[in-house]
Amino acid sequence: MFDYIFLQHYWWFLIALLGGLLVFLLFVQGGNALIFLAGKDEAERELIINSTGRKWELTFTTLVTFGGAFFASFPLFYSTSFGGAYWVWILILITFVLQAVSYEFQGKAGNLLGKNAFRAFLTLNGCLAPLLIGTAVGTFFTGSQFMVDKSAVLNISAPTISRWANGWHGLEAVTEPFNVGFGLMVMLLAIALGALYMINNIDNEKLTAQLRRSLLISFTAFLLTLIFVLVQLLTMEGFAVDASGVVVMEKYKYLHNFLQMPVVFVMFLVGAVLLVAGVALTLLKPNFKRGIWLAAPGTVLAVMALFMIAAYNNTAYYPSTYDLQASLTLANSCSSEFTLRTMAVVSLIIPFVVAYIAYFWRQMDKKSLTSDELTTTDKY
Amino acid sequence: MVETALVDWSRLQFAMTAGYHWLFVPLTLGLAVIMAIMETVYVVTGDEFWKKTAKFWMKLFGINFAVGIATGIILEFEFGTNFSNYSWFVGDIFGAPLAIEGILAFFMEATFFAVMFFGWGKVSKRFHLAATWLTGIGAAISAIWILVANSWMQHPVGMEFNPDTVRHEMVDFWALVLNPVAISKFFHSVFSGWMTGAVFAIGVSCWYLLKKREMRFALASIRVAAIVGIVGTFAVMFSGDSSAVHVAEYQPMKLAAAEGLENGGQRAPFSIVPGLEVPGVLSVLATHDINGFVPGINNLLDGYTTPNGEVMPSAEQKIERGKRAIAAFGEYRALSGSDPAGAAEARKVLDENIDYFGYGYIDSPQELVPPVGLVYWAFRIMVGLGGALLLLMCVVLWAVYKKRLASMSWLQWAALLSIPLVYIAGQAGWIVAECGRQPWVIEGLLPVKAAVSSVSVAAVQTTFFVFVAIFTLFLVIELRILTNAIKKGPEIE
């Protein structure tokens, strides 16, 4: 039962799970996008920064683990995409580097650039990181221009296997409206999740009212991008892998994937309903604050479903539009069976990790954050 | 054609990132232990003084920690962005420890770091103490896995080359984890972090003594830090000893370069500085036997016969066998679909020469010699400063127990001025380890020039300067913030 094919699918499931968790945890970025929009004065901005600032490392760690898991399980993706779409990944990394120090530095004496510069870095990361990550994931459905030639190893003077076929090295992704729509969708979702999280985590009436307004605007815009992305996704040609392993274009491939994998389709629908319910209840019931805890599982489920239709059901998850047969599939880009099996054993520890994170999260967030707390305890 | 400039800039970018990362990591590793001990004393005695003392060092820990994270994320992804061929060629093995590091260590650090900083009053005292220890343990676990990965590059074990997938594949996970190089390197690196944390804490505390401020805090901090530092330094010495034996066995060219040893032999001398040698000592360090044979650079290039009769091939012969391996690999790929017998024959030749595969990309034997001057002096700086800092910490601890330190301003100055020295020692250590193994990204299997991504030189130059600018700015800001926080002080007295 646990054969090589199963292990490939199992590891894609873990990639999808990490991807789903990462998008949920982008509420940190979304919250930071609102520092200057929802936070009208210093006290409110401090509350926003100290609310997201107690969770930012989890987002960061999930991103790093997402990268590590991809490296371990699908190394050809790691080498092809990171080495090829160079500029996209470098830009994403730079925004995260700026974010990593900004919490700690922004409120400290002697920080050279001033408080607002570091807050601007947080906002920049808050907008750009989800936008760029979303745009990069969009290429899972529209493809990129690269070639893979393993025989290149034989060429002593130029042995690089994966090569990008244009000089833009990933930046060309923004010329595809679907990718940009996907990026905007992730960014707006992150902002909506950030607002939901802070509505629950911060006890401040005025700020909460502003966050509700931000939630309404961002979620409405999100729904528009979602409709755009879904219409495109379900009507576009997709990259199918036939029985002999040849990659071919198939009309309505991603719609077919949903229909041929009803469990995945149900996951997506349940996720979407939970997300909408979390937002709707928060907007419609003035005292309802726990919308994030409906939206969180909703986001994870919906994102996982999108990852699954990108790769399951004989689909090339990282297609090449330059050389269709260079497209990456679960089978041709994964690690060896031994490595996948070994790492599958290691992955059994994940539930324990999730459990202790959840436990300490609960311990730390039992009481909502107030301005009073920031005057009496440590803060950023 | 892979340009030499691309190889050099890719190498430089990674070296720069790693160098900056290692400015911040050792202080994290060392301060974590020091502040955890202080908080333990607080929990055991209930004395608020120790809580405030621990909190002050935590504050400095937090400022430093953030920059360590910022530089660390770049390192992980640079394997993909700048060394894409490496990522495929050995990703099957190398990716695993990175993923495990994320799952086991980073989440632990991220979770308990937040509890440690913001959990005062929200969780119980004992819970908080556990969080502080677990933050430090998380950092050490992280070190285990990244050093397992690094050590595999120095001494690749537990894998086989698969010509069908064109990569090395893991066949023995435990060989990877229990790689003797990894064990030595883990202790050597983590305990050097203890040294860094200790020297930093002692230096900062001595500044307070010089200013006649926070005297109780300073003397108490010095007592804890000096003990941690001395224990750490002895552990660094013992692990350094086993590291030397491993280097002699698995990376003899690195050892020869570190010693500037052109022609080796038995009873090999240890060079203290050029022109000043101690006979036989290098043999003792490298083999634990005064008559042990240590090859020099020329021996390794020309080939040699060990005292027990083992004939070691010359660099030319290794290059020749490497080219044979690559040619056989090409033949195997060409025939594997059409001529099973021919493919099997080619596979046989490939298997016979696979250990020299990486040499096939080498153009001339001189390429196999790392930068001798750099590695030679880096090694002396590391060892010399390590010894001097051990002596300093011992004297400081003695002076504290004799209650004389408060009046010995020369010693306080020495301790304060030693802070940059411990960083120089740490950087020098990594220069020995990493520059000493050039031209290999994986010893014997893959040279750096066959590992790089296919991006333009200009792209790598651009990102290099962008990262230099960002990291330098962060370093300057961190130093300013640390200085301000130190000037403000723990405000205990």
Image: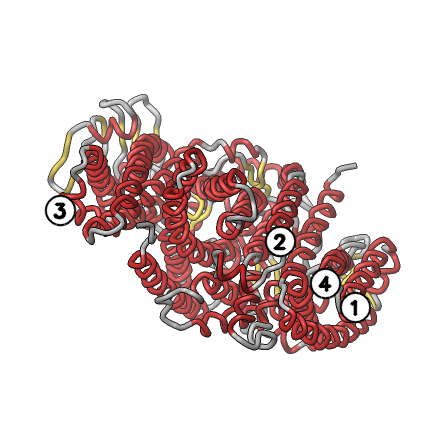
Q: Secondary structure at mark 2?
A: loop
> Decide: marks 4, 1 in contact (CB < 8 A)?
no
> Decide: marks 3, 4 in contact (CB < 8 A)?
no
Question: From where the camera sits, is residue B378 visible?
Answer: no
Where's residue B302, x and y in %? 29, 39
Q: Which residue is mark 3?
A: B410
Q: Which residue is mark 4?
A: A289
Kindly indicate the quadrant of the structure image that contains residue B277: top left
Q: Secondary structure at mark 3?
A: helix
Q: Secondary structure at mark 1?
A: loop
Identify the residue at horizontal 54%, vertical 55% (top origin): A57
Q: In this rendering, do the residues under marks 3 and 1 share a single chain?
A: no
Q: In this rendering, do the residues under marks 3 and 2 share a single chain?
A: no
Gap in Å between the C-alphas at discs 4 and 2?
Answer: 13 Å
From the viewer's side, name the closer residue of A323 and B351: A323
Kindly indicate the quadrant of the structure image that contains residue A315: bottom right
Other-residue count near label 1 (Cα within 10 Å), few / some / many at <14 / 14–19 / ≥20: few
| Side of A72 relative to B279 (left or right) | right
